[in-house]
Image (cartoon, helix red, strand yellow):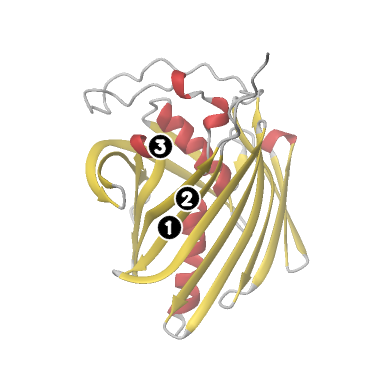
Amino acid sequence: MRLLPFIAFSLASFFSVTINANADTLAPSSSISAFNKNNDPDKANPPPIQLSPSENNHCNKTLNYNVFFEGHHIGDYQRNIVWNGTQANIYTKSTVNILITKAKLNQHSKLHWSPQRQSFVTDSFERNIKGLMTGKVTATFTDNGAKATVIEDGKSHQFNETLLPILDGDTIGAQMRLDIMQGKKSFDFILQNRDDTSHYYFKVVGEETIATNFGDLKAIRVDQIKKSDRQLSLWFAPSVDYQLVRATYKRKLLDLKAVLISKQINCPAPVLIK
């Protein structure tokens, strides 16, 4: 039974990194470059997209995923993204059932676009887990992501980084999606965990056609690299708003999979000036 808390914690960490937010506010659809038409990730990147905040693209999104452990459906994961200009509130709900034990995750993250860094930066997050691994974690990020303060069970931890901003999983998801839309083929991030930080590296492998809940789709595959003890692969579908449509994670006794089963996109009607 000691495996159960490990699985629950791994699920929370896994989805914290992989389930992505929305970067459309800063990259209008007309300016998004298509993925390398020759499907060759080793060729030169396309010219970077010129980013500027858009006051006319405030689409809110709800993404629903099914979670599988060794092929068995064990839970669901929902991400609701609410934009306000160049800032976003992201609300996460997850329920995982393992044998006779249930774990529930609720998280609220805040992020914004940083003109200085030309990337997304985390403002704060609050995470509550009930059932397995019960506990509450809050974090605040300052100095444009250079500093983070994490409070868990009344204990405060301080973190500092100089090369890259410290980010939570939601912000990493938003930035990764935007990097893919820009045609970048490799990227790395500093993830804030409960009691430490971790450096994650990713590489675009190429384009694959996979079966999804939306039919057979061409998807851009991204693999985590520089970690020999695990295999994390992510598939983003350009025809489904560049959203993550599949993710797999294998490590020791873990064999996890997430698939996007539904999405809702609500965009405000444009204001007509007479």
Question: Pointer 1: residues within 10 angstroms few (<14), some, or many (20+)?
Answer: many
Amino acid, disc 2: Ile
Question: Pointer 3: residues within 10 angstroms few (<14), some, or many (20+)?
Answer: many
- The residue lying at 46 percent from left, 82 percent from top is 2
- Residue annotated with mark 2: 19
Question: What element does badge 2 sit on?
Answer: loop
Which one is earlier in the sequence, the residue at label 3 or at label 2? Answer: 2
Quarter of the picture containing the N terminus is bottom left
Nearer to us of marks 2 and 1 is 1
Residue 134: percent from the left, percent from the top? Answer: 63, 74
Which one is earlier in the sequence, the residue at label 2 or at label 1? Answer: 2
Residue 6: percent from the left, percent from the top? Answer: 47, 72
- State if disc 2 and disc 3 touch (CB < 8 Å): no
Amino acid, disc 1: Tyr
Q: Is residue 17 left or right of residue 38?
A: right
- The residue lying at 51 percent from left, 69 percent from top is 95
Question: What element does badge 3 sit on?
Answer: loop
Q: Which mark is residue 242?
A: 3
Residue 56: percent from the left, percent from the top? Answer: 61, 25
Q: Nearer the viewer, residue 240 or 98?
A: 240
Residue 191 visible to an observer of this rendering: no
Q: Which mark is residue 65?
A: 1
Above or below residue 71? Residue 178 is above
How far separated are the C-alphas under marks 3 and 1? 15 Å
- State if disc 1 and disc 2 touch (CB < 8 Å): yes
Q: Which mark is residue 126?
A: none
- The residue lying at 23 percent from left, 27 percent from top is 40
Amino acid, disc 3: Tyr
